[in-house]
Image: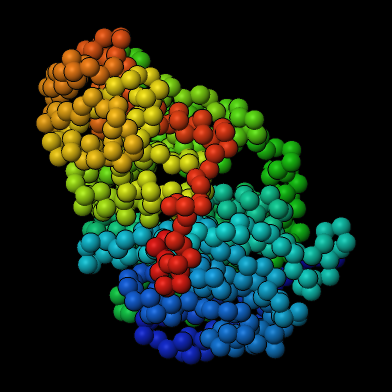
Amino acid sequence: MPRIIRIAAAQMGATHLTDPREKTLARMLKLLDSAASQGAQVVLFPETAFTTFFPRHLFLDAAELESWFEHGDIRTAPNTKPLLDKARELSVDICVGFAEATGDGEHFNSCVFYHAKTDSILSRYRKIHLPGDFEPWPDPNAINQLEKRYFKPGDLGWQAFRVSDLITSPPERGDPIFGMMICNDRRWAESWRVLGLQGVEVVLCGYNTAGWAPHLWGTSADQDPAEAERMAIFQHQLVMQANSYTNATFSVSAARCGLDDGKYLLVAGSCITDPEGRIIAQSKTIEDEVIIADCDLDLCRPGKTRTFDFARHRRIEHYGRITSQTGVVEPPKLSEDGNTTTNGAHALVGRGHPLTKEGKKIRILLCNPNATKSMTENCLKMLQSTLPPDVEVDGFTAPEHAPTAIEGNLDNVMSAAAAVKAIVPIADQYDAFLVACYSDHALIRALREELDKPVIGIMEASLFAARTLGNRFGIIATSKRAKVALEDAIRHYGFDGFCAGVVSCGLGVLELETKSEKEVLDIICNVAKDLVAHGVDTLTLGCAGMTKLKSAVEEAVGEDVQVIDGVVTGVHHLVGIVRMGGKTAKAGMYSSSEKQRKARGQNYF
Ligand code: CDT
């Protein structure tokens, strides 16, 4: 008995910022009626289908922003109920995208699969690959995509699910297996493979994809808008076709398209593809339109049992990077002498094989709270040769709008705010955090409050090491002002009884990078020798930007004096604490204010 389902995509044309919700809902009801009259059993609606694509706008007013979200049970909430009622009345299952506000104040870009016969939500998906930015572009003409600002990354994974009552299935195959993803997810092979590994037979994907939007796509503003539109549709259909083929599944995609507000073009290109990667239905307009196809699920069998028989052909022993690494790690560059040099910032510099007891690597995020990437790079370089094989260190550099150096209290606060917002949402991926600014930086305490994983700054770590290895320490500071700030910090950390001096080298943080290496080294080495002459037996380098100078300073002061770099010592301190299972204590100062913030209606992340 063939396993054939008639599936439709309800493409939706322009939806303007000022369109009343009732107008948009009426269009959805009409599309559903039209699809049902053509015999559709399942109808897919686009991403955030009930409203315009609001993440292109900056809303600073919390109530206004909240009005774009759906609250409560989508089956009974007044803004959405009529669509689900109609689906039930027509006995058609639907998948619909919407902005979801949960009962406990979280926000997701979501979709649900509604099963008409049982009036139930069979499955819910929350978009995982959120594109765009947290901050709008400074250019007032830029088209923004503020999904990272308004939504949390999905927390439900990609769960395939079976849908009953669509076909009379032979018992050995069972009911059809569906999976859902939302817009940007379709560009990532990972989303598809996770569903493919659950035997998915139909992937549903609603989308809002801009045409000409140079800031978003990273293309030239001179690009011809018609060419931009063609390219966006080409890339959309390319990923739908290629991933349907490599996972031997049907796929259905529904666009929200057209010229919103007379100026924001979203592309059309809704399509249905078969498991061989062929398009079997596609839209012809950029308006409300139903496309429909009969999907014979048995056509998934050849791919699933031969070319893409995962059980026989996959080689997971070589796929480790896919789940252990986010950014790109290029092979080392070749230098003129044929030796290799190290990679740059955002590189994972761990070397390899999972060796910890649980077979899991320790992952540390080195957090440079300023926006100067080269400093992050230098810190990673310093670390590389010291890391055990089961430790990985990822470099984080604060976003571009953060201060490029931290030379005063204002820089401190601004950099902490920018960095904490970017770090907390990705904190799950790490076991510990090293704040790479040589000061009592505000980011350290902010992270300790928000996370329970261990956090330390390079200054505090260097002082622990200095007390372990020597009796009187000295610090080489950057500016005169930094000297005073470091003296205050030493008192705050409780080490003042052991400090033999903090001496300024008279250089600004960025001068460590811009002045010639020889000039910088001469100055720093003279300060180091001066401190030794005043009785220090351990020297610490008072700026992340001095990390690369360690060996030259060691040579200048001789082997009886220990030179401590806070970056290396900080990482190894954290590794020890992680191996011990240590966590940040929450009984006192480091308890989070999250609950109180939410009660005040504020959520910074
Ligand atoms: N809505 C959505 O996810 N849109 C994205 C825009 C591209 S971001 C580079 C998309 O993948 O179509």
> What is the residue that sits farthest to the top in this orientation?
559
Q: From the image, which quarter does the C terminus lie in? A: bottom left
Instruction: Name the one closer to the observer, 104 or 256.
Output: 104
Q: By what rule are the colours in the image chosen?
A: rainbow
Q: Residue furthest front?
A: 497
- On the image, the x and y values in percent for residue 330 come to 41, 32
Q: Position of residue 185 (x, y in %)?
A: 52, 57
Residue 148 located left or right of residue 241: left
Q: Which residue is rendered at x = 68% and y = 63% of the image? A: 178
Figure check: 294 above or below 538: below
Question: Considering depth in this image, is 60 or 280 the residue closer to the camera?
Answer: 60
Residue 187 picture location, percent across and down: 50, 54
- Please identify the residue farthest to the right as the structure is shown: 171
Residue 605 versus residue 535: which sits nearer the camera? 535
Q: Which residue is located at x 21 percent, y 52 percent?
A: 410
**Residue 41 vertical placement versus 414 (above, below):** below
Residue 198 visible in this rendered orientation of the protein: yes
Q: How many marks?
A: 0
Q: For the N terminus, give its image quadrant.
A: bottom right
Instruction: Report whether 47 appears left or right of 354.
Output: left
Q: Quadrant of residue 600?
A: bottom left
Asked whether residue 344 is in view, the answer is: no
416 relative to 452 in the view: left or right: left
Judge left or right: residue 335 versus residue 254.
left
Q: Which quadrant of the figure has residue 318? A: top right
Residue drawn 51% across the image and 40% down it: 431
Q: Residue 287, position in %: x, y?
A: 45, 79
Identify the residue at horizontal 65%, vertical 54% (top origin). 195
